[in-house]
Amino acid sequence: MNKIRVWLASNSESCPARPRLTGDSALEWIGQSDLSGDALTRIEATQPQVLVLGTDSHDRRLNRILKRLTSALPATRIIVYSQSQDKRFVMRLLRQGVHGYLSKVELDTELTHAIQIVMQGNVFLCPSASGALVREYRKRARARKQNVSLSPSLNRIITGKAE
């Protein structure tokens, strides 16, 4: 069985230590870098199956980086992690083609699961992000005077608590 090839990139001055890929020997770290132009070229040449991208919501280069990577690597699943809990930031990432989002505090505990989910063709949102998005959705629905209620099973899926 071929291992899932994972690359870690971060916009911080020094890339953080690699998060643990817990309990899954089918995952393999193949590279780690910053997000400089040279590093993006190496990522593109390596063509990882999953790119784990550390960033913050204030990085002005993020739109350009994501546009370049999603264009050059259409088969690569991109999972972003950040300290931001801003639902607008998460929605912007999803609109730009990101396949998963993790808060930085959930990186070690949820990354392996997130990789498995996105490799199945699904979107992964950590519980804090999915909860914020569901609350925003319900708030907007109430504002439109629609009574929207998610089924218990759909709510579990959206909040990442599905079995």
Image (cartoon, rainbow, N blue to C red):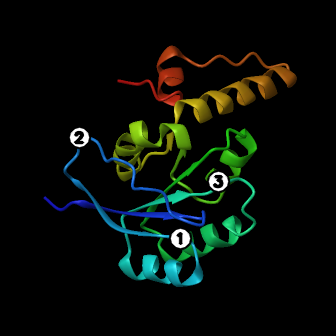
Callout 1: SS = loop
For mark 3, what is the residue? 93
> Which one is earlier in the sequence, the residue at label 1 or at label 3?
1
| On-image quarter of the C terminus | top left
Q: CA distance from mark 1 to mark 3?
A: 19 Å
**Labels 1 & 2 near each other (Cβ < 8 A):** no
- Left or right relative to 125: residue 28: left
- Left or right relative to 153: residue 57: right
The percent coordinates of residue 46 (x first, y second) are: 36, 78
The percent coordinates of residue 16 (x first, y second) are: 48, 57
The percent coordinates of residue 59 (x first, y second) are: 72, 62
The disc placed on residue 23 is 2
Residue 93 vs 104, above or below: the answer is below
The percent coordinates of residue 75 (x first, y second) are: 42, 67
Callout 2: SS = loop
Quarter of the rendering containing residue 2: bottom left
Residue 115 vs 41, above or below: the answer is above
> Which one is earlier in the sequence, the residue at label 1 or at label 2?
2
Residue for point 57% across, 72% down: 35
**Mark 3 is on which residue type?**
Leu
**Mark 1 is on which residue type?**
Asp
Quarter of the rendering containing residue 146: top right
Residue for point 75% across, 15% down: 147
Q: Nearer the viewer, mark 1 or mark 2?
A: 1
Callout 3: SS = helix
Q: CA distance from mark 2 to mark 3?
A: 28 Å
> Which one is earlier in the sequence, the residue at label 2 or at label 3?
2
**Labels 2 & 3 near each other (Cβ < 8 A):** no
Q: CA distance from mark 1 to mark 2?
A: 26 Å
Residue for point 48% across, 22% down: 156
For mark 1, what is the residue? 34
